[in-house]
Amino acid sequence: MIRFAALLAAVCFAADFEIKDEAEFKKLFPAGAKVTRLETNLQFVEGPAWTPGGFLVFSDIPANELKRWDPKGGLTTFRKPSNNANGNTVDQQGRLVTAEHTAHRISRTAKDGTVATLVESFEGKMLNSPNDVVVKSDGTFWFTDPDYGLGGRKKEQAGNYVYRFDERTGALLPVVKDFDKPNGLCFSPDEKKLYVADSGKPRHIRVFDVNSDGTVGGGRVFASIDKGGPDGIRCDEGGRVWSSSGDGAQIFAADGHLIARILLPEAAANLTFGPKTLYLTARKSLYSVPVKAKMAKRPKR
């Protein structure tokens, strides 16, 4: 009896999903979908971004590396040192955009590999430690700047803000100032809503209305994470929000109700979509799971 109970517990723990809304779940995952661990024995991985080159770039923060993973070549080093890079994304021209902790900046990698600073200060003072970044269809960069990665540096900013940077004008605007630890962020498919995760004490995701002048309004709580806290988040084409969590990942419908959990043996820090695949960075490992869902595309202008 004891052996049977232990076996049952092991089977339950090893389950890949916990389904709350079966109808919605079936829209997102093919039948028989399973989680696969692609790589492990890393240090602390974050910031996955699928590139037009057909490979994934992600950060190993303590190792001070950007890693590259592709289905054919496996895992290699993309860049070292990385300035303890965290979040990554890709702009409209397919260039890698990165939030770097120890360089307190947002950088962009040109097609020839040249790395340039986009923004590193606000009102003449160093940014804290940019954490995650997204690019809107108008070419503006939106990023979070908590103080997780300050290290021994003195904090110069008065708070932990969410910023909007317009490269054309050089204007940097704090769009939200009342977060504890702003972290992952993403836009709805029509870019009329901005979702921002707070991985500090609140452990929730808030949603803001995006105004035509680049400011935001509102800021209600969209969803709370009950296992660990929210970190990286992504929005799919159907307006659903996918969030990393202490139990792996949690998927929320556009109205905020929980559709399902992707269960991992390690807490996930971030996630992103590739071709028919969701990639998850979780502590020391990189995972994947087949999906039907696709990441929300930028609206055409």
Image (cartoon, helix red, strand yellow):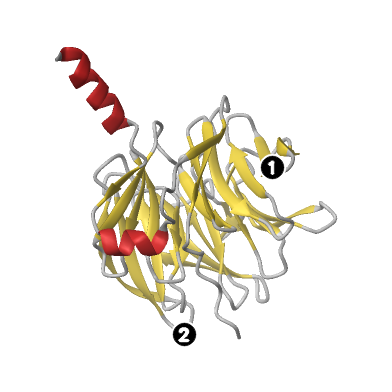
Q: Is residue 115 left or right of residue 277?
A: right
Image location (x, y in percent) of residue 91 = 66, 65
Q: Is residue 228 visible?
A: yes
Residue 192, picture quadrant? bottom left
Dot 2 corresponds to which residue?
Answer: 212
Query: What kind of residue is marked 2?
Result: Ser
The residue shown at (58%, 76%) is 137
Say if residue 178 shows up in the picture: no
Residue depth check, mark 1 versus mark 2: number of the one nearer the observer:
1
Q: Which type of secondary structure does the marked residue at label 1 adopt?
A: strand
CA neighbours of label 1 inside 10 A, class few (<14), some (14 to 19), many (20+): many
Mark 1 and mark 2 lie on one chain; the one further toward the N terminus is 1
Q: Give the residue at x 46% y 71%.
A: 237
Q: Which residue is found at the position 48% from the left and 83% from the top?
A: 213
Front residue of 35/187: it is 35
- Residue 282 percent location from the top left of the image: 47, 37
- The secondary structure type at the circle numbered 2 is loop
How far across and down, in percent of the image, does residue 164 sit?
52, 68
Residue depicted at 46% across the width and 40% down the height: 148
Where residue 85 appears, as percent x and y from the top left, is 61, 43
In this view, the residue in front, 271 or 85, is: 271
Pick the front one: 26 or 67: 26
On residue 57, the disc is none
Whole-Å distance between the Cαs marked 1 and 2?
A: 37 Å
Residue designated by label 1: 68
Q: Which amino acid type is marked by label 1? A: Arg
Residue most extreme to the right? 112
In this rendering, the answer to whether 243 lies above or below 239 is: above
The relative height of residue 144 versus residue 4 in the rendered view (above or below) is below
Front one among 50 and 128? 50
| Image quarter (top left, top right, bottom left or bottom right) of the N terminus | top left
